[in-house]
Amino acid sequence: MIYFFYILAGFLSGIFGGLGMGGGTLLIPVLTIFLDFDQKLSQGINLLSFLVMAIFSVYIHYKHGFIVTKNIYWIIIFGVIFAILGAILMTFLPSKILKIGFGVFLILLSIVEFVKILKK
């Protein structure tokens, strides 16, 4: 039964990651809720799987002209800086705080998307 959840986690995160929506929004809850992984471990697994999925997704999106590289360097520079700061901060925070923060993020994301749908 546990392999079903491993396959489900890979399937869902791969689909959402390939669509450019971030597979971690599904992978992390599957790992923490259904497989009882620690939040920090789940985030680490998500980062590792994201690297592999991102390589293939970027290639396919670029090949089809869905990536515009103009001024992307500023996003990359500040993304790397804040990723390093976030990773350092994560080492000092307990898993419970990270879990709550991730949950709040998902709730806010859901509200924003719901409001967008209502506006249409």
Image (cartoon, rainbow, N blue to C red):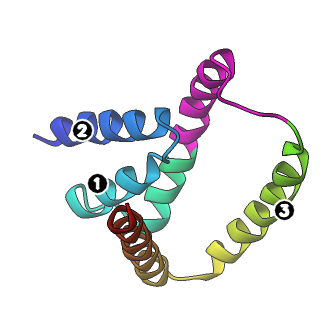
Judge the density around disc 3: few (<14), some (14-19), many (≥20) Cα neighbours within 10 Å. few
The residue where tag 2 is placed is 8
User: Is residue 78 within the magenta segment?
Assistant: no
The residue pinned by badge 1 equals 30
Residue drawn at point x = 42 percent, y = 80 percent: 104
Residue type, mark 1 in image: Val
Say which quadrant the C terminus sits in: bottom left
In the rendered structure, find residue 38 and report the number of the disc placed on it.
Answer: none
What kind of secondary structure does the magenta stretch mostly adopt? helix
- Tell me the distance, in whole angstroms, between the alpha carbons under discs 2 and 3: 32 Å
Q: Quadrant of residue 61?
A: top right
Residue nearer the viewer, 70 or 40? 70
Asked if marks 1 and 2 touch (Cβ < 8 Å), the reply is: yes
Above/below status of 101 relative to 62? below
Residue name at image x 60 percent, y 33 percent = 54
Residue 119 location (% of width, % of height): 39, 67
Q: Label 1 vs label 3: CA separation?
A: 28 Å
Residue 74 relative to residue 90: left or right: right
Q: Earlier in the sequence, mark 1 or mark 2?
A: 2
Look at the picture and state if 56 lies above or below 5.
Answer: above
For this view, does 49 lie left or right of residue 91?
Answer: left
Q: Position of residue 63 (x, y in %)?
A: 67, 15
Q: Residue 81, labelled with which disc?
A: 3
Image position, residue 24 (x, y; %): 45, 52
Q: Looking at the image, do the residues carrying marks 2 and 3 touch, with CB atoms under 8 Å apart?
A: no
For the N terminus, which image quadrant?
top left
Residue displayed at 38% across by 71% down: 115
